[in-house]
């Protein structure tokens, strides 16, 4: 039941609207090329974040991630969630574990819009919305707490998504 509602909710990644008018001012062209969908809708339309979307719904974080932001989301794929020990996702989705689910999800979110070019060549600790820090290493590829960034800079109207290959957990 949760998996069904989660997959409907986490079809958030939608194609970005990048076309600009052939004629018109630079401001009009820039506005036309700006992403038109928020982080949640972008994730839903991508089709590879069904578990994440379901978790965001179960944690009542949809409105937050549809808010103004900007946010940077390190988004684990469905495969990343599937790699967790058996029963982990189901346990996190239980109503009595909502606080733990919120902590895990907000650990994947950094305030502000952080593009990969902002991180290039650096190793740093960045404070998450959850309150703890994630370790980012962008010296040879990019990892976040050891999870590899497999797609970077997926822009949304209220931030950016970086796709990661593992679920990261707060200490």
Image (spheres, rainbow, N blue to C red):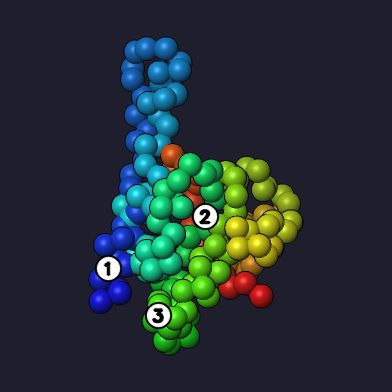
| Distance between the alpha carbons at the discs numbered 2 and 3 | 23 Å
Measuring 67% from the left and 47% from the top, which residue is drawn there?
Answer: 120
Q: Look at the image and tell me in which quarter the C terminus lies.
A: bottom right
Out of 167 and 111, give the one closest to the viewer. Answer: 111
Residue 1 in view, yes or no: yes
Which mark sits nearer the N-terminus, 3 or 1? 1
* Secondary structure category for the residue under label 1: helix
> Badge 3: few (under 14), some or many (20 or more) residues near its Cα, within 10 Å?
some
Q: Which residue is mark 2?
A: 73
Q: Which mark is nearer the camera, 2 or 3?
A: 3
Out of 2 and 126, give the one closest to the viewer. Answer: 2
| Distance between the alpha carbons at the discs numbered 2 and 1 | 21 Å
Give the percent coordinates (x, y) of residue 31: 41, 25
Q: Which mark is nearer the camera, 2 or 1?
A: 1
> Badge 1: few (under 14), some or many (20 or more) residues near its Cα, within 10 Å?
some
Q: Which mark is residue 25?
A: none
Does the residue at mark 3 contact the one at mark 1 (Cβ under 8 Å)? no
Q: Is residue 81 left or right of residue 104?
A: left
* Secondary structure category for the residue under label 3: loop
Out of 136 and 131, give the one closest to the viewer. Answer: 131
Q: Is residue 24 left or right of residue 129?
A: left
Give the percent coordinates (x, y) of residue 85: 47, 85
Which mark sits nearer the N-terminus, 2 or 3? 2
Give the percent coordinates (x, y) of residue 99: 51, 73
Measuring 25% from the left and 71% from the top, which residue is drawn there?
Answer: 4
Q: Which residue is mark 3?
A: 94
Which mark sits nearer the N-terminus, 2 or 1? 1
| Distance between the alpha carbons at the discs numbered 3 and 1 | 14 Å
Measuring 60% from the left and 50% from the top, which residue is drawn there?
Answer: 111
Q: Which residue is mark 1?
A: 5
């Amino acid at each position: 039941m949760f998996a069904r509602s989660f997959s409907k909710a986490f079809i958030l990644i939608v194609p970005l609207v990048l076309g600009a008018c052939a004629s018109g001012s630079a401001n009009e062209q820039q506005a036309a090329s700006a992403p038109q969908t928020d982080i949640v809708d972008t994730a839903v339309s991508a089709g590879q974040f069904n578990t994440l979307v379901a978790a965001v719904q179960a944690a009542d974080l949809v409105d937050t991630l549809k808010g103004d932001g900007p946010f940077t989301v390190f988004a684990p794929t469905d495969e990343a969630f599937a790699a967790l020990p058996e029963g982990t996702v189901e346990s996190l989705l239980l109503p009595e574990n909502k606080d733990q689910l919120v902590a895990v999800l907000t650990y994947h979110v950094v305030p502000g819009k952080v593009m990969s070019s902002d991180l290039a060549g650096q190793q740093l600790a960045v404070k998450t919305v959850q309150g703890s820090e994630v370790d980012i290493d962008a010296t040879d590829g990019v990892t976040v707490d050891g999870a590899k960034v497999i797609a970077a800079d997926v822009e949304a109207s209220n931030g950016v998504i970086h796709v990661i290959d593992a679920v990261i957990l707060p200490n």
